[in-house]
Amino acid sequence: MVVSLCPKDWFLHPAVSVFFSCFGPSTIRMNYLVHTLILLAAAELTRAGHVKVRCKEEQITAKAGEDDIIQCRFYSRNKAGSVAFVWKKEDAAGIIYNYTMSHSSLEEQEPSYRDRVEVFDNEIPKGNVSLRLKNVTLSDSGIYKLSVATRSQTTETQVLLSIRALGTQPVIHSPSDELGLLVLVCESSGWYPAPRVTWENGLGENLTSYSHTQLTNCKGGSVCVKSTLEMDNWPTGNYTCTMWDQELDEGVSSTFTLIHRVPLGTVIGATGASVCAFILIVAVCWSWW
C-alpha cells in the first residue's frame, strides 16, 4: 500500500492535483512533477501581466531651440488603463511627467518643464510612452529615467540626452594695427560645445594655421568664440571664417572682402611729393616768361 505524502489541498492550482494520484517513491516521477510546477508558475506570471519597456535609442543628441522626442514603448498583457508610467530626470527635484489611472498627474512636476513636455495620449493604449520635449535648452541635457508599472510589476529604463547649440552668425572685422599689419577677427557666441574654426581664402586655400582661437564662457553655459587671422602680404580678395559642429554636421560662416588700404604715411608722402613737383614745374615755367 502506497500512502500519499502530499495532500491535494496543499496546492492551489487544479492542474497539479492530477499528479498526486501517482506520486510515489519514484525519482523520475518526482523530477517530472517539479518541472511541471515550474512551467505552471511561469504561465501564471505571464498571465499576471509581465511588462517590458524599450526605448529606440539609449543616447540621443538634439539641437538647442528645437523639439525632441524620447521614443519608448511598453509591452504588457494588461489593459492600458491598468498601466502607469513616470518620467524623471536624474538631477531634477520634481518629476518630468506622471501618467496614472488613464490621465496625467502633474502636481509635482519640475517647474522648468511646465508647458514644455507632453506624451501621446491617443497612443498610450498601443504601448507608446514616448516623451516630447519642446524648445530644448542646454540645461535639458542629462539622464532621463522611465518607470512603467502594472498591478504586479514595475520596470525601468533610462536614456541619455545631450543638447548641442549652434552659435550666432560670425561677424568679421579688421581692427587697426599700429604696426601696419592687417588682422581679421571672427567672433560668434552661443556655442556648445566649442566649434571647429577654419579660415580659407577665395581660392579655397586653408589658412587656419595662421590663426589662433580664444574661448570664453557666455550666458546659459554656452561658449563665445573669437578667432584671429594674421598674415603678411595679404592679397586682395575674399576671406571666409567657418565655425562647425561636427556632431550635428552643421555650421555657420561669414566672408570678408579685403580691399588693400594705402597706409596714411604713404598717402601723405605721395601727396607732398606731388605738391613739390607741381611747385617746381610752376617755378620753371614762370622763369621762362
Image (cartoon, rainbow, N blue to C red):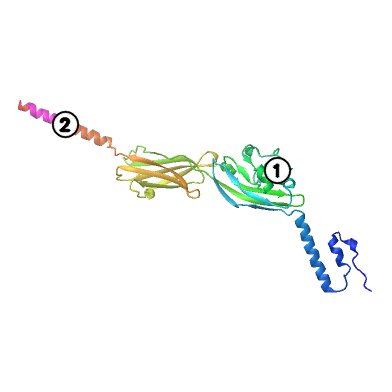
Tell me the residue that label 1 is attached to: 99
Mark 2 residue crowding within 10 angstroms, few (<14) / some (14–19) / many (20+): few
Based on the picture, tell me whether residue 279 belongs to the magenta stretch: yes
Which mark's residue is nearer the viewer, 2 or 1? Answer: 1
Please state which of residues 137 and 16 is positioned toward the viewer in this rendering.
16
- Give the residue type at disc 2: Cys
As rendered, which of 281 and 6 lies closer to the eye?
6
- Residue 59 horizontal side relative to residue 172, left or right: right
Q: Can residue 93 be seen in this view?
A: no
Disc number placed over residue 276 in the picture, else none: 2
Q: How crowded is mark 1: few (under 14 residues within 10 Å), some or many (20 or more)?
A: some
Residue at x-position 39% and y-position 49%: 208
Magenta extent: 275-286
Quadrant for the N terminus in the image: bottom right
Q: Give the alpha-carbon distance from disc 2 to disc 1, as whole Å.
A: 91 Å
From the top left corner, tell me how far across and down residue 57 is, in percent: 60, 52
